Image: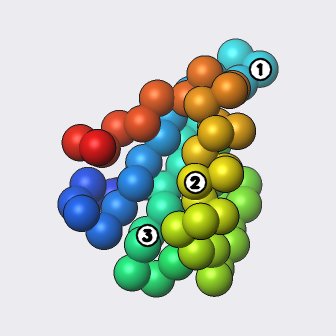
Amino acid sequence: MVAILSDDVIAWIWVQDEKLIKAIYHKKHKTLVIFDEHDEVLLKREGVDESQIKKIEILFLNCGAQRMDST
């Protein structure tokens, strides 16, 4: 997974079922991508707006995710 954290990117990381899971949201492209520990894409959704990502982030945080960007 190659992702440069910037103002345009929000990233999360957590462990689920003993596997590392990573999620990246690109604000400009409104795209959410979730990767497994081998950087294989588990889910990709386009057209995700910021109000939706706030709800998704709550789910991630309830799973023990940590936000990796500066905000």
Q: Which residue bears the numbered disc 2?
A: 54
Residue 40: % across, % down: 63, 53
Amino acid carrying mark 2 in the image: Lys
**Can residue 20 be seen?**
no
Front position among marks 1 and 2: 2
- Binning the other alpha carbons within 10 Å of mark 3 as few (below 14), some (14 to 19) or many (20 upward) gives many
Residue 31: image location, x then y, percent: 55, 74
Q: Residue furthest front?
A: 51
Q: Position of residue 10 (x, y in %)?
A: 40, 54
- Left or right: residue 40 versus residue 50 is right
Element carrying mark 1: loop
The C terminus lies in quadrant: top left
Tell me which amino acid carries mark 3. Answer: His
Q: Give how far apart the Cα atoms at labels 2 and 3 are.
A: 13 Å
* Sequence-first tag of 3 and 1: 1
Q: Residue furthest right?
A: 17
Identify residue type, mark 1: Asp
- Dots 1 and 2: beta carbons under 8 Å? no
Nearest to the observer: residue 59 or residue 25: 59
Circle 3 residue: 26
Left or right: residue 9 versus residue 12 is: left
Write the residue at 46% across / 82% down.
Answer: 29
52 horizontally vs 11: left or right: right
C-alpha distance separating marks 3 and 1: 26 Å
Residue 43 x, y percent position in the rendering: 72, 60
Tell me which residue sits at (65%, 64%) in the image. 52
Q: Which mark is residue 17?
A: 1
Q: Nearer the viewer, mark 3 or mark 1?
A: 3
